[in-house]
Image (cartoon, rainbow, N blue to C red):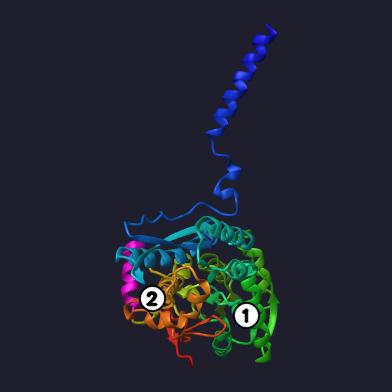
């Protein structure tokens, strides 16, 4: 009897082991190993074609998910267009792109883990990320691992540190400090309260703006930050910021939570101006505030829909048709950057040598077709930063107006 029971137990145990082998272990899944599943369908190569995988790691969940999706949308559009037009050729070989995207939840450690996974599984010569913390996390090893970083951040430090395989896509934010300050002081006054995002990007922006503000005779009456990944009700934070009776609020981060801060400030009686960090976009903030009137006195970067580069209008129409909304600068810059990287590969004669591709980035920029110039990127500096003309905008009388800045 005991032998029978033991045999039955062993049979059942074997069955459970077999069954267990048919079930995915969550600890071994993509989402449990440094990032979420790919958000894009894999491209299929036709006979005679080869695939080049391009990596993306950004926030596709959490408070910054909408921002991450819009950055990814620009890449998707460029990749789909290139592939649908037959790809591109180098030395008679046709290539198409396979875009592989992973969720990093806006966390630098997740960005680094995602990058290593993209390299191991997809051998990506270029990995895009839309936040400075993620860029810096990858810069720890990208030169050693030999891959290019497509850095969508205006943080000047990511190129100032001499990483030779980093390309900073948008203009450096330090060009905005003077015109933003001048506009806010001229129209509202010299007392400022700072309440930006608590990310590294927010800290760096604050460390650049507030000393300049004081150099111009201004006073900082409050200096704190908001962790948008944790805080959803800003009443106490905004109330504390307004106790010093500021003329101007310095705010910023992703558009949606930044707009909530501005809205709550208005509801608490604030009548002054806003300096808006360049990550947030005035037109996108309107979707939260309900009107631009609530943002009167805000100065920030010029929204893409208020720009007029050679390829802007066509891109806006295509984007609206595909996604049902107006595009922001993050989508536009990623779109044109993907074309620039493709042209750089063609000029370098290689799809898998990041150093050669980087050395031909100016050739790539020069070769971008006019109709693809959602932004006109004039040149790449020696440090790896793209250069475009400086444009800013403000909300006046419920409308977005552009402000001339000497370029």
Residue 193 found in image quarter: bottom right
Task: Depth check: give the residue in front, 51 or 189.
Answer: 51
Residue 220 visible in the snapshot: yes
Q: Secondary structure at mark 1?
A: loop
**In the rendered image of this protein, does residue 43 appear above or below residue 307?**
above
Main SS of residues in magenta: helix
Task: Depth check: give the residue in front, 357 or 293.
Answer: 357
Residue 153 found in image quarter: bottom right
Nearer the camera: disc 1 or disc 2: 1
Name the side, left or right, on which 127 lies relative to 234.
left
Name the side, left or right, on which 379 lies relative to 213.
left
Q: Residues within 10 Å of mark 1 (few under 14, many from 20)?
A: few
Which residue is labeled 1 in the image? 162
Task: Depth check: give the residue in front, 277 or 150.
Answer: 150
Instruction: Find residue 277 and report its horizontal and vertical position in percent.
Output: 56, 76
Does 328 lie within the magenta span?
Answer: no
Does 321 lie within the magenta span?
Answer: yes
Instruction: Find residue 46 and report its horizontal and vertical position in percent.
Output: 32, 57
Residue 169 visible in the snapshot: no
Q: Secondary structure at mark 2?
A: helix
For image coordinates 66% across by 12% down, the residue present is 5
Which residue is labeled 2 in the image? 305
Name the side, left or right, on which 393 lies relative to 33.
left
Write the start and end of the magenta stretch as one range. 311-323
For image coordinates 58% across by 42% down, the residue present is 26
Residue 17 found in image quarter: top right
């Amino acid at each position: 009897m005991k032998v029978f029971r033991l045999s039955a137990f062993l049979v059942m145990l074997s069955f459970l082991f077999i069954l267990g082998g048919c079930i995915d272990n969550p600890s071994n899944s993509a989402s449990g190993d440094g990032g979420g599943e790919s958000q894009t369908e894999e491209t299929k190569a036709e006979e005679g074609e080869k695939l080049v995988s391009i990596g993306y790691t950004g926030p596709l969940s959490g408070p910054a998910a909408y921002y991450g999706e819009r950055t990814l949308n620009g890449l998707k559009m460029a990749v789909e267009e290139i592939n649908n037009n037959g790809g591109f050729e180098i030395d008679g070989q046709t290539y198409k792109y396979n875009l592989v995207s992973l969720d990093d939840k806006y966390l630098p450690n997740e960005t680094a883990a995602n990058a290593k996974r993209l390299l191991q599984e997809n051998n990506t010569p270029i990995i895009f990320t839309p936040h400075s913390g993620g860029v810096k996390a990858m810069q720890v090893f990208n030169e050693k691992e030999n891959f290019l970083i497509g850095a969508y951040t205006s943080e000047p430090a990511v190129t100032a540190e001499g990483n030779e395989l980093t390309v900073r896509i948008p203009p450096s934010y330090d060009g905005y400090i003077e015109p933003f300050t001048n506009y806010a002081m001229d129209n509202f006054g010299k007392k400022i309260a700072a309440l930006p995002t608590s990310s590294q990007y927010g800290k760096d922006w604050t460390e650049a703006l507030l000393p300049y503000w004081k150099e111009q005779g201004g006073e900082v009456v409050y200096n704190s930050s908001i962790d948008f990944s944790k805080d959803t009700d800003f009443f106490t934070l905004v109330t504390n910021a307004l106790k010093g009776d500021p003329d101007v609020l310095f705010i910023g981060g992703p558009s949606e939570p930044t707009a909530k801060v501005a809205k709550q400030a208005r509801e608490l009686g604030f009548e002054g101006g806003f300096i808006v960090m360049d990550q947030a976009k005035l037109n996108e903030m309107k979707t939260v505030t309900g009107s631009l009137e609530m943002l009167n006195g805000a100065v920030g970067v010029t929204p893409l829909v208020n720009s007029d580069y050679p390829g802007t209008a066509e891109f806006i129409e295509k984007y609206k048709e595909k996604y049902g909304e107006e595009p922001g600068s993050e989508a536009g810059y990623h779109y044109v950057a993907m074309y620039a990287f493709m042209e750089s590969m063609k000029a370098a004669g290689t799809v898998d040598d990041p150093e050669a591709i980087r050395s031909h980035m100016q050739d790539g920029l020069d070769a971008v077709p006019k109709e693809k110039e959602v932004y006109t990127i004039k040149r790449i500096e020696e440090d790896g930063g793209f250069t475009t003309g400086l444009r800013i905008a403000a909300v006046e009388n419920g409308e977005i107006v552009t402000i001339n800045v000497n370029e």
